[in-house]
Image (spheres, rainbow, N blue to C red):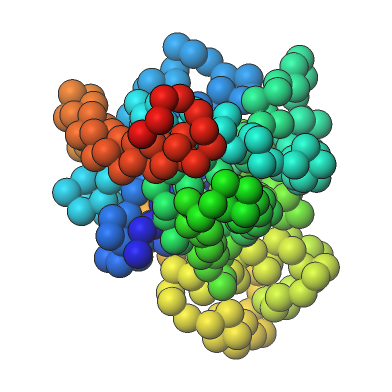
Amino acid sequence: MRIFSGIQPTGRKHLGNYIGAIRGYLAGQERGDPALYCIVDLHATTVAYDPGRLRSYVYDTLAMLMASGLDPDRSILFRQSDVHEHTELSWLLSSVTSHGDLNRMTQFKEKSAAQRELVSAGLFFYPVLMAADVLAYRAHEIPVGDDQRQHVELMRDIAQRFNAAYGDTLVVPEHRIPDVGARIMDLQDPLSKMSTTGSEERGLIFVDDEEKAILKKVKSAVTDSGSEVRRAPDKAGITNLIDILAVIRGSAQEDVEREFEGQGYGAFKGAVAEAVVDYLRPVRERYRELRGDEHALEAVLGAGADRARALASETLADVRQAMGVGPPA
Ligand code: ATP
Ligand code: MG
């Protein structure tokens, strides 16, 4: 069982990333043979970004993954741009990618609307590079949040179309999206997902946020004007906090609703805030230690890239052979 997932080094990562994706990476580390987790710096260049900070964001993200419990001896942790096979494969896969399908991608629509200066072709092409990330490893399973469902569907189509056109070469992967917590919402705008690049600071809980900041952000989370702690379509803010608490406690959403029956939002928000603080504390503490040593982090990335390249280059050789590209094998 090969497991693959990617995370963008676009700045400080948040509770949504942790609950929706990183929790799944940790579970994958137990089952993967191997589990590969990639810091996708090439994806981060598809929207406006600061080149002077990108490398440092890669270290931030790696330190955060390791602080969460990913162990470079058990999982393959690496930087996307170190393994050139990803970009070559993305071009080769473009021959079996439908332009119309790319046009339908919700993430492209949302992110392109948010760009002030340039909507890059890279933002449009993003799902093809993401397909290459996964298909290069012939991964079976992809732990991701709910917002990636459509991209995973697309890469399945790409793999199937490739196999039909050129012969059975690629593995058609499946997503692994958690039942609860797959879409953590922005605390200030509970109709939008919590997002590294799209949310304002007040709407995000960063994994390495100070205790005081977490308490303040949760307590000032936007809720409806009622007082009942229960999930409902017109109670997006409260529903989000119920999901967060249920995931942290490992209990059912119904149990959370029952526990806070008859109590106001104040008491409930206080409980959620405390739970989040306790949940993230060990990660924040380990993060500080790990982040300080950039040489050690670079060494992890280098070793991870060597292991990743060994797997990806086998797939690339088969893909080139099947497509008639390059000299005969
Ligand atoms: P951006 O919004 O700029 O794309 P991001 O917050 O989505 O950034 P990514 O690095 O793109 O961060 O996503 C990493 C992983 O986190 C993906 O698997 C994604 O599905 C998951 N994820 C992102 N946001 C959430 C969220 N709000 N709730 C649950 N999972 C999420
Ligand atoms: Mg994203």
Q: In this view of the protein, can residue 110 be seen by the observer?
A: no
Q: Quadrant of residue 231?
A: bottom right
Q: Is residue 295 above or below residue 184?
A: above
Across and down, in percent, residue 251 comes to 47, 81
Q: Quadrant of residue 181?
A: bottom right
* Residue ID at (53%, 15%): 50
Across and down, in percent, residue 216 comes to 54, 48
Q: In this view of the protein, can residue 303 be seen by the observer?
A: yes
* Residue ID at (54%, 37%): 323
Q: Quadrant of ligand 2?
A: top right
**Is residue 50 rendered to the left or right of residue 327?**
right
* Residue ID at (44%, 68%): 248
Total tally of numbered discs in the picture: 0
**Is residue 73 rendered to the left or right of residue 13?**
left
Across and down, in percent, residue 98 comes to 75, 42
Q: In the image shown, does 77 or 231 lie closer to the viewer?
A: 77
Q: In the image shown, does 86 or 118 lie closer to the viewer?
A: 86
Q: Quadrant of residue 256?
A: bottom right
Q: Residue furthest front?
A: 328
Q: In the image shown, does 99 or 275 lie closer to the viewer?
A: 99
Quarter of the picture containing the C terminus is top left
**Is residue 224 rendered to the left or right of residue 64?**
right
* Residue ID at (56%, 73%): 179
Q: Residue furthest top?
A: 52
Across and down, in percent, residue 44 comes to 54, 28
**Is residue 198 rendered to the left or right of residue 132?**
right
Quarter of the picture containing the N terminus is bottom left
